[in-house]
Amino acid sequence: MDLEFKSPQHVLEEVRAMRVRGGSPFGRAAATAFLLVARNGKYDSTESLLGALDEIADALMAEKPSMATIYNARVMIVDCVKQGMASASKEEAAKEVIRRAERFIEWSREAVDKLSRVGANLVRDGDIIMMHSFSTSLMGIFRRAREAGRQFSVICTESRPLRESRYAVNTLVELGIPVTYVTDASAWEFLRKSNWVIVGADTITYDGSVTNKMGTAMIARLCASTQIPIYCASEILKLDPRTKNGYKPVLEIRPAEEVVSRDDFASFEGVSVINQFFDITPAKDITALITDRGVVPPSQCGLLWEELAKEIGRR
């Protein structure tokens, strides 16, 4: 369930505090921030309204540069209004921002629901499924599978340094799904006990590669070496269209304090501590993507994005 936000600044604070979890909720949070800006009504001109939208969009993208959903929310809501309604009244521009933001949120929720239904069909009785990091899409799939009466268990890698899989464990226990919680370093040992692996995504590139929590690429490589299928669950709305033209996803670097404490080493002199939060899994290491358009090979992602963009354009 999405958080309830009181203001655009509140959205930014929750994003900064990592209380927004998952690529889909990040996109909806951005759309909500734009909607709240437009509802404010204090702006004396269309120009000042658009300036406020740009300001919050810049701040959100600076906080979470790896999230394609935030970028796409900006393009589909803020940039479209700037291009098409720059000469409109502030009231008309605000109304269009609200309309587009509400529709974006609806698209996102519909897409996650659709892919959850698709993914649930892959779950079989007796399956042991490994997952890495927290994803609302994964939780949706597991929930739908349980509603269909499937009996299965899940192995959760902890996903350091913030151990996002803790939140997955809470959800899985509520659903009555047996869970085994293991360290990230145990991935190889427990992967061989799994029937298949599922991960989420924060960004999909045009060729079908996936940006996700650090460690995903390693697990995918291990899957390739053992011929264990690995699926990525993601709505097509997470594709970053800039990657068609060679843009490289930005991989967020977070504070070193999340990895080490001040007294961990006798001295930090000559020591570099890098807390890279995401990595990129090559398309060749992904069995398929579970999307709102079905289970598809990574190579089809660009085509599916083009179809989505046309639908959005018509609306």
Image (spheres, rainbow, N blue to C red):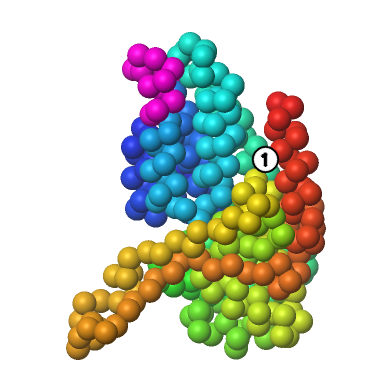
In the rendering, at what x and y percent does residue 47 appear? 41, 20
Compared with residue 197, is residue 173 higher up or lower down, i.e. above or below?
above
Question: From the viewer's perspective, is 196 left or right of 139?
Answer: right
Within 10 Å of disc 1 (Cα), the crowding (few <14, some 14-19, many 20+) is some
Name the one closer to the observer, 103 or 123: 103
Question: From the viewer's perspective, is 266 left or right of 315?
Answer: left
Number of marks = 1
Which quadrant does the C terminus fall into?
A: top right
Q: Residue at x 34, y 77 (%)?
A: 273
Compared with residue 160, is residue 222 higher up or lower down, i.e. above or below?
below
In the rendering, at what x and y percent does residue 17 appear? 34, 53
Label 1 sits on what residue type? Glu
In the rendering, at what x and y percent does residue 112 appear? 65, 47
Q: Main secondary structure of the magenta part?
A: helix
In the rendering, at what x and y percent does residue 258 appear? 33, 69
Q: Which residue is mark 1?
A: 110
Query: Is 278 a magenta residue?
Result: no
**Quarter of the figure with residue 150:** bottom right
Query: Is 40 a magenta residue?
Result: yes
Q: Is residue 50 visible?
A: yes
Question: From the viewer's perspective, is 162 left or right of 157?
Answer: left
Q: Is residue 147 visible?
A: no
Compared with residue 11, is residue 254 higher up or lower down, i.e. above or below?
below
Q: Residue at x 52, y 44 (%)?
A: 70
Q: Residue at x 65, y 75 (%)?
A: 220
The residue stretch that appears in magenta:
39-52
